[in-house]
């Protein structure tokens, strides 16, 4: 469908405020297990260990509990909060057999209960209000407690993947011309990790660089006074999708969610048919898995 001159990805636009954008994931619980990458246990262990035998972690933005269960291998107690009622219910059901896990429906900015050895968040903390959330995280952490983020960042891939991206943007333009197509990756892995080296002192700026391509509100927050230097971990991964899985992943994009039902249905079928026929029902998507940690200042 596309030649070798790949069009640039559309620029990122936050549009809605962070809480509103985060709230939109409440309607996407059905795509989490199918379309979203999971978090490798070994990677989480490398970020967080060692921890005290009776350590207590607060997970911010638990979603359906995808990472919550993994924290049980590291902490004696897990308190997880999730603002979406449907997502929270699913996480509670998922964790029902674990008496040392508590899952609560709450925004992080409204949570003022307990003290913790670690505040952890997987692909969620960037939807909190940085003018409040970093100070709150520091307040909730014990001395020498850790703030830990793990997230995925899409990458520029090989020529085959970039052709797929261009083709899918063409389908977006054809079926939903008033909506920007998905950005997919805008950086190579080397560019991503080299860029992180420019933000060694602020885990807030580092997180926004990974998630948004540049520091935003966290740039004006003295996060470096609240937490020590940032430790960065990362690895390049890929995920294999069939047609249904790839469509499920696309459904998490804002442009997909905001279009009208008719356009969304037509686009869903067009993308599914494209993966089935042009990709032989197999498409490989590159990601960088990124971990950021910083220790609470005295």
Image: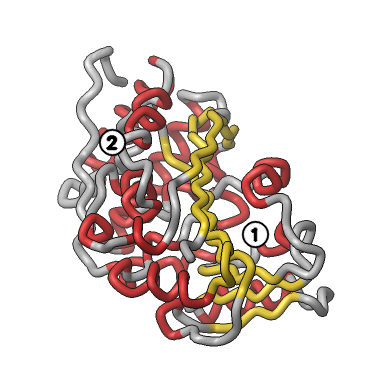
* Quarter of the figure with the N terminus: top left
For disc 2, the neighbor class at 10 Å (few under 14, some 14 to 19, many from 20) is many
**Contact (Cβ within 8 Å) of mark 2 with mark 1:** no
Q: In the image shown, does 282 or 239 lie closer to the viewer?
A: 239
Label 2 and label 1: CA atoms lie apart by 29 Å
Q: Residue at x 30, y 32 (%)?
A: 186
Q: Is residue 211 above or below residue 58?
A: above
Q: Give x and y (percent) for residue 42.
A: 72, 41
Q: Is residue 239 above or below residue 278?
A: below
Q: Nearer the viewer, mark 2 or mark 1?
A: 1
Question: What is the quadrant of residue 23 in the picture?
Answer: bottom left
Q: Residue at x 33, y 73 (%)?
A: 19
Secondary structure type for disc 1: loop
Which label was assigned to residue 169?
Answer: 2
Question: What is the quadrant of residue 10 in the picture?
Answer: top left
Which label was assigned to residue 33?
Answer: none
Q: Give x and y (percent) for residue 47.
A: 62, 46
Q: Is residue 255 above or below residue 87?
A: above
Question: What is the quadrant of residue 235 in the picture?
Answer: top right
For disc 1, the neighbor class at 10 Å (few under 14, some 14 to 19, many from 20) is some
Q: Residue at x 46, y 70 (%)?
A: 138
Q: How many marks?
A: 2
The residue indicated by pointer 1 is: 66
Q: In the image shown, does 266 or 256 lie closer to the viewer?
A: 256
Q: Give x and y (percent) for residue 56.
A: 69, 71
Q: Work out which residue is located at the far front of the displayed protein and give it.
A: 298
Q: Is residue 122 left or right of residue 218?
A: right
Q: Is residue 131 left or right of residue 66?
A: left
Q: Give x and y (percent) for residue 96.
A: 78, 77
Q: In the image shown, does 202 or 225 lie closer to the viewer?
A: 225
Q: Residue at x 45, y 79 (%)?
A: 107
């Amino acid at each position: 469908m596309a030649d070798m001159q790949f069009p640039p990805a559309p620029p990122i636009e936050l549009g809605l405020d962070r809480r509103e954008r985060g709230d939109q994931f409440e309607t996407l619980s059905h795509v989490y297990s199918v379309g979203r990458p999971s978090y490798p246990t070994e990677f989480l262990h490398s970020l967080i260990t060692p921890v005290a035998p009776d350590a207590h972690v607060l997970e911010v933005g638990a979603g359906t509990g995808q990472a919550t269960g993994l924290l049980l291998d590291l902490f004696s107690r897990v308190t997880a909060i999730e603002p979406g009622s449907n997502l929270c219910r699913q996480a509670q059901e998922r964790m029902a057999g674990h008496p040392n896990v508590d899952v609560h429906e709450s925004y992080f900015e409204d949570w003022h209960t307990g003290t913790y050895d670690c505040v952890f968040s997987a692909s969620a903390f960037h939807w909190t209000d940085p003018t409040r959330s970093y100070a709150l995280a520091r307040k909730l952490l014990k001395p020498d407690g850790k703030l830990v983020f793990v997230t995925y960042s899409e990458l520029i891939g090989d020529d085959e993947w970039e052709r797929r991206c261009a083709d899918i943007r063409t389908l977006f333009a054809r079926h939903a011309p008033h909506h920007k197509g998905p950005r997919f990756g805008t950086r190579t892995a080397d560019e991503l990790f080299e860029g992180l080296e420019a933000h060694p002192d602020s885990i807030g700026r580092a997180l926004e660089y990974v998630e948004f391509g540049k520091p935003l509100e966290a740039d004006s927050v003295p996060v470096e006074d609240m937490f020590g230097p940032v430790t960065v971990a990362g690895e390049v991964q890929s995920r294999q999708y069939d047609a249904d899985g790839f469509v499920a992943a696309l459904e998490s994009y804002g442009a997909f969610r905001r279009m009208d039902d008719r356009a969304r249905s037509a686009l869903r079928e067009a993308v599914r048919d494209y993966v089935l026929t042009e990709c032989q029902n197999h498409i490989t998507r590159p990601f960088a898995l990124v971990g950021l940690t910083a220790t609470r200042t005295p």
